[in-house]
Image (spheres, rainbow, N blue to C red):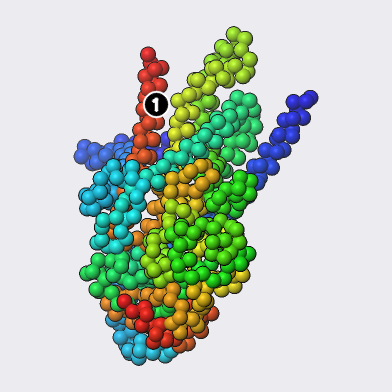
Amino acid sequence: MRTKRISCVMMSILMAATVLAGCGSSSGSDASASTEAPAADSAAASTSASSTADASADASSTEAAADTASSTADASAAGSVSGEVTAAGSSALLPLAQAAAEDFMTENPDCVITVNGGGSGEGLKQVAEGSVDIGDSDVYAEDKLDADSAKKLVDHAVCTITMAPVVNADLGVTNLTTDQLVDIFTGKTTNWKDVGGPDEEIMLVTRPSSSGTRTLFKKWALNGAEEASNQALETDDSGTLLQTVEQNKGAIGYVALSYLVNNDKVATVSIDGVEPTLENTYNGTYKVWGYEHMYTNGDGSDAAQAFINYMMSDKFADKIESMGYGASSKLSDEAAKSHQE
Amino acid sequence: MSNMAADGGTVQGKTGTAKDREKALRMYKFRKEYLGRGVVTACGLFIIILTVAIGVFLIIRGTGTFTKFHHSVAEFLFSSNWSPVDSATGSGGGVGAAVYIVGSLLTCGLALLFAAPCAIGAAVFMTEIAPKWGEKLFQPAIEIFVGIPSVVYGWIGLTVLVPSIRDVFHARMGGYSVLAAGIVLAVMIFPTITTVAADAIRSVPDYYRKGAYGLGSTRWQVIYRIVLPASKTGILTGVILGLARAFGEALAVAMVIGKTRAFPTSILSPTNNLTAAIAADMGNSANGGEANMALWSMALLLFLISMFFIALIHFIENRSAAALKA
């Protein structure tokens, strides 16, 4: 009798477990499908690359040529652009490029624009090989490609991106000097009380060494000092970095302002008293920013040119700012000069 | 059968020359025998070619660190100075991957420590103790486990496991740790080991058990003294397969290990491993540059490790087969 009862209980537990596991698996496979999709897309993009490139080349030679050059000269004379454009690369630029692609396709229904991520290095490699029409990058092509490949590419600085140090909103530190920031990120300062904060251990949260965000932050905020990778958590993307900073009071990291739109769980930190904002970027007082690049192989197809012109147009500038990026056209001379290569 | 008879009929019914008949016979043989055999052989060859091609590609890419950039294999394996130059042509940085290698070994070892006893216990339970529901409930439940994608394990680990490790053990780096990675991996390899071990236990002939019972053994004695030793080879195969899966897992581990480039000081401190390091930098590093090549070398190392595990399984199986014969 007793064993029977026990077995009954265990049976029901097992049953519940099976059902739960079943639920887990079905939602799980959905998740995998959605995460694998971009990878599959980009793989497809690279394999069918030559054919799309051909297609757009055909388009440019036949239709676009007939469409006159005025459409490329002025993107707002739109509605007349057709053809296919593929872009891949920088994940920092991805949300903006996708938003631009959607708007552009609404205005030009005959145009199909596909934007993928993959990383700056991948984007530059693919545009140099001709697998995509536009390679998105956080860094200059010369940094990632050999001189011969880089020479063929044409740079379009479509927007600027401003990086800000971020801390947990509960920490209460709002300003750091450059020296303090360098000491924190190189692991010399390990407690917040040494820089005027509460008695809390500092937890560094960084990005991989090949990340464009990290490269910019190192160059402009840390004066080129190498971060202490052996004392820091490393996160693959800015979203995960933010989550880590949100969950840990002593954490400090850095993200682009585009990730901070509508986020009040983390606080930005001023550097030497200058707040990381778009205004301060434009007027040249805040230095930690860089250009987002769209590279074309040569001048690119007409459709690709039209798309890039659209992104840089005054009409799209508002959208750029609402998403947390900066419009290149609004930079003051001082600001532009300080970042000349 | 009827089809064949009909075909045979046409072959015999033909009143044409011997040549025609021979031709028809050849067609018949082709359809009934060589066609199927050919397709299957082609599939088999394709898989072999694919495996060899991947191997060759990895060897070509992975040895670039040593041939093109002139680093020594010893530096790669035993140095912890990881600072490869990330540009197309620059060189002169360090490519010591010891932190990643140690990280992989530690997390997988820990996972095995957690998973192997539980998995073998579960296998015994579902085959020997409760074979009926073992088959009806336990087996399907575990098979569903295998199908859960690693990103889900990683995500749960990140939202549940990591914060609780921080709060329970007061881990310094927010709970990202070797322990978290070990537990996530343990859960992931548990079903692999269980399934293979259960198959091995089931294949132990019943007369072994009956013989032992006949000599007065208790149920546990039968399991412990007879069944487990007899299925040792299969259980080991399951353990090694689980270990191979743990070594190859990237996503779930990357989410909870913290990816700090330092040897862990305890199981509560974060570190990094081979797969997570490859995934972090592969997209952004300059193609063909020192950093990129060093990552390919790490990929080659993973390939060699998995080859080693497969070879080990074959070695164990061959040895036990030889022992059975002797």
Which chain letter goes with mark 1?
B
Q: Secondary structure at mark 1?
A: helix
Q: Quadrant of the N terminus of chain B?
A: top left
The quarter holding residue A309 reads: bottom left
Could you tell me which residue is drawn at 67 percent across and 38 percent down?
Answer: A14
Q: Is residue A319 left or right of residue A44?
A: right
Q: Is residue A48 left or right of residue A150?
A: right
Q: Is residue B165 left or right of residue A44?
A: right
Could you tell me which residue is drawn at 32 percent across and 60 percent down?
Answer: B86
The kind of residue tagged 1 is Ile
Could you tell me which residue is drawn at 57 percent across and 61 percent down?
Answer: A193
Instruction: Say above or below: A83 vs B220.
Output: below
Residue B276 visible at all? no
The quarter holding residue A13 reads: top right
Q: Quadrant of the C terminus of chain B?
A: top left
Q: Which residue is mark 1?
A: B316
Seen from this angle, which residue lies furthest right? A1
Q: Nearer the viewer, residue A18 or A162?
A: A162
Instruction: Say above or below: B279 vs A285.
Output: above
Q: Is residue A215 left or right of residue A246?
A: left
Could you tell me which residue is drawn at 40 percent across and 46 percent down?
Answer: B99
Q: Nearer the viewer, residue B269 or A317?
A: B269
Instruction: Say above or below: A325 vs B119.
Output: below
Residue A102 x/y as whole percent: 48, 77
Q: Nearer the viewer, residue B204 or B35?
A: B204
